[in-house]
Image: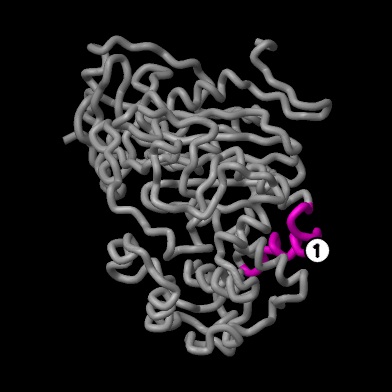
């Protein structure tokens, strides 16, 4: 067993690489996801795994160099750029929005910091009706501003905290006006070149032949291509960057080590006392403080987190999602830190296909919001949650099954046509139709 444990550095965490490999093999083999995962410890990559395809039709596999749309993780880059402009005296956190865009509602009251902390009160443009179909064609600054002005506000600046992509679109335009260059050029000069990133850029149309991932959704255990995709001229600094899992970790490692902004500025970015930081969210995971950001765009989902005390950066970017990046990272970190999973107190059992027959059917719960269909595939039970995920269960005792990634346990009572679902400790009773 020792041969399968990887240790980095004298004080580093020892982790079970084989078990991590098994996790991503399970995700891939059960069509729970496609994408790339990376862990950095003290600035060096200690684990990397890519699963699934960047181009399903052409059987092009995802790999370490595959580019993905990262969605709202872009906001951390934008916040870093704005914070650096503040450090250089070209802007201040108290600068009012009307200096740049006087026609925006409440522009005199909205500050740069309000925008960074999602406290501007400006309506979230991506929640506008028909936005998804509107944004698939190129959009000018004038077109975006027109919608932002028309959409108005939902609360007074500084009174609430509510996530809005509008904030970071405007911050991008402000950076362009200050620097007198495109956001793509600003990104290149302030982050990409200094960090020597090779596979990170302002995104364009996806070129699968250049190892750029296409987005997919899962249907009937197959990956179907998402054809309508955002033209990235619209989201700009709110969601237009493409990158790799490894290079996102390089970015976060450098951000938190003080290479991009000062420690004082980083502390301001990390301050979540108002509900959100500046381009960063904060939380506690397994008694460890974490910071980071997630993203979702056109079927791509992503999550990057950084653990300052452990000097650990973790990223998962997916171009096909059933099991979310959040759940994938949560499970991976349990393995990395050697945290006991209560679902794994007993080893898995292997049942014959015919032994699974007594559990099959459609189950409905009186207080649960959706029905669950139970089927079988070879020696595994397959769960199909209506309007939810499809995933396999493994047996661990008589009439008892579990899924570690989803933190689910099910106990069946075939003679009573009943099943008890334990979802993260919450139990619900289901009756078979």
Quadrant in which the N terminus is drawn: top right
Residue 433 placement (x, y as % from top left): 16, 35
Residue 298 placement (x, y as % from top left): 37, 51
Give the image quarter of residue 244: top right
Residue at the image position 62 percent from the left and 80 percent from the top: 111
**Within 10 Å of the Cα at label 1, are there few (<14), some (14-19), or many (20+) other Cα atoms?**
few
* Above or below for 433 versus 163: above
Give the image quarter of residue 273: bottom right
Residue 167 placement (x, y as % from top left): 52, 71
* Above or below for 282 versus 362: below
Tell whether 419 sits left or right of 296: left
Tell whether 274 sits left or right of 138: right
Q: Is residue 259 visible?
A: yes
Q: Which residues are magenta?
A: 258-274
Which of 29/366 is in front?
A: 29
Question: Which residue carries the number 1 mark?
Answer: 264
* Colour scheme of the picture: one colour
Residue 76 placement (x, y as % from top left): 61, 58
| SS for callout 1 | helix
* Above or below for 264 versus 292: below
Which of 72/163 is in front?
A: 72
């Amino acid at each position: 067993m020792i041969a399968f444990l990887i240790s980095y550095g004298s004080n580093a965490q020892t982790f079970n690489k084989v078990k991590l490999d098994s996790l991503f093999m399970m995700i891939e083999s059960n069509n729970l996801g496609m994408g790339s995962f990376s862990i950095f410890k003290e600035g060096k990559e200690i684990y990397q795994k890519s699963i699934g395809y960047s181009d399903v039709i052409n059987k092009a596999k995802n790999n370490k160099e595959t580019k993905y749309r990262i969605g709202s993780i872009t906001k951390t880059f934008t916040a870093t750029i704005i914070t650096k402009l503040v450090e250089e005296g070209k802007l201040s956190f108290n600068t009012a929005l009307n200096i740049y865009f006087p026609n925006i509602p409440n522009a005199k009251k909205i500050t740069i910091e309000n925008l960074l902390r999602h406290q501007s009160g400006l309506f979230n443009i991506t929640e506008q009706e028909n936005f998804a179909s509107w944004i698939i064609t190129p959009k000018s600054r004038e077109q975006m501003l027109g919608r932002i002005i028309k959409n108005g506000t939902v609360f007074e600046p500084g009174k609430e905290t509510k996530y809005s992509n509008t904030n970071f679109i405007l911050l991008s335009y402000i950076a362009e006006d200050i620097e007198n260059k495109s956001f793509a050029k600003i990104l290149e000069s302030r982050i990409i070149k200094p960090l020597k990133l090779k596979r990170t850029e302002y995104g364009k149309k996806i070129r699968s032949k250049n190892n750029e991932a296409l987005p997919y959704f899962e249907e009937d255990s197959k990956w179907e291509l998402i054809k309508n995709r955002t033209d990235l001229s619209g989201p700009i600094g709110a969601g237009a960057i493409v990158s790799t899992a490894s290079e996102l970790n390089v970015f976060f490692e450098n951000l938190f080590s003080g290479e991009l902004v000062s420690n004082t500025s980083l502390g301001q970015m990390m301050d979540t006392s108002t509900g959100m930081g500046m381009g960063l969210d904060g939380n506690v995971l397994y008694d460890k403080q974490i910071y980071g950001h997630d993203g979702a765009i056109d079927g791509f989902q992503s999550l990057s987190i950084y653990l300052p005390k452990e000097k650990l950066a973790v990223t998962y970017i997916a171009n096909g999602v059933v099991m979310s990046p959040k759940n994938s990272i949560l499970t991976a970190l349990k393995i990395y830190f050697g945290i006991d999973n209560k679902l794994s107190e007993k080893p898995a059992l292997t049942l014959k296909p015919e032994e699974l027959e007594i559990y099959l059917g459609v189950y409905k719960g009186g207080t649960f919001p959706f029905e669950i269909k139970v089927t079988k595939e070879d020696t595994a039970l397959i769960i199909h949650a209506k309007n939810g995920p499809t995933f396999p269960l493994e047996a661990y005792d008589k009439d008892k099954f579990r899924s570690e990634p989803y933190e689910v346990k099910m106990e069946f009572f075939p003679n009573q046509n009943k099943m008890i679902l334990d979802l993260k400790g919450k139990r619900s009773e289901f009756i078979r139709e």
